Amino acid sequence: MFDFTGKAVLVTGGGAGIGRATAEAFKAAGARVATIEIDPSRAEEARAALGDDALVVVGDVTDAAAVADLSAQVDAAFGGLDVLVNNVGDFLMLAKPFDQLSDAEIARLYATNLGQVFGVTRAMIPLLRRKGAGGSIVSVSSIEGFRGIPHCAVYAACKAGLTGFTQSLALELGPEGIRVNLIAPETTDTPQVPVSLMIPEEHRRHIPNWIPLGRFGTPQDMASGILFLASPHAAWITGTALHIDGGALAAAGWYRDPRGTWTNLPVLSGNGLNF
């Protein structure tokens, strides 16, 4: 379905989870792939999976010097860039009430979930321009940028900010033929968020009731959405969010109880609405 033969693609955080699945999917579709990964062991695993012609850099995208070095390496290896995937982000790193966050923790959350997107994107735009019209930027946001999430207020604010950035940058780069979009996943089973291990055995039977499509997401679900947005199949799509969430955002708090009844309450009672 997707053909990226001869295209140069950069995926940040490509050592595991969504990033790894995305890098491998682009590779399978014929692309030349580069990735940056902060964890050396995961970088080695990615290098083994992606092959000798892939560019795998160990580095931290929140470090301006590392981003500048990455840009130089991508330029030297590929002579430009066709697709940038901003995948790095982390909501579990500092999950606690907002008033308990220190200034340093807020700064860290910002740097990891939004600031680095600004830095990496700014560094890669010249490489995208070098390839001419047809370039694509896809960022990995979250369903939490479109709804509230307790104990993750700064994370959610960063993801909401990513929507504004995506829409505005799409206007700036549209005349040059460079498209800018994002995906907004619901909970995805990855090494960072190992849903299959986090849910006790006695509660796993409820999973089909919690999300309209009956399961949590997989890295491959997200990779497919990213490849679509980066491909010619999405040639007239820019400045938009693709919600890959099994219907969770549409449900907006509604789910099915064990009897199959739709409810907006964790436990059925005389209160709330039940259908």
Image: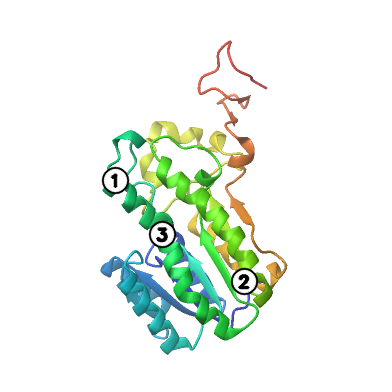
Dot placed on the residue nearer the N-terminal end, 2 or 3: 3
Q: Residue furthest top?
A: 270
Amino acid type of the residue tagged 2 in the rendering? Leu
Label 2, label 3: how many angstroms apart (C-alpha)?
19 Å
Look at 47% across and 78% down and name the residue there: 33
Which label belongs to residue 103? 1
Q: Which residue is mark 3?
A: 115
| Residue 197 vertical position relative to residue 3 in the rendered view, above or below | above
Which label belongs to residue 173? 2
Residue 100 drawn at (x, y percent):
29, 35
Look at 64% across and 20% down and name the residue there: 274
Residue 214 drawn at (x, y percent):
58, 41
Label 1, label 3: how many angstroms apart (C-alpha)?
15 Å
Amino acid type of the residue tagged 1 in the rendering? Asp
Q: What colour scheme has been applied to the protein in the rendered image?
A: rainbow
Residue 191 drawn at (x, y percent):
36, 54
Of 118 and 144, the residue lying toward us:
118
Amino acid type of the residue tagged 3 in the rendering? Gly
Number of numbered discs on residues:
3
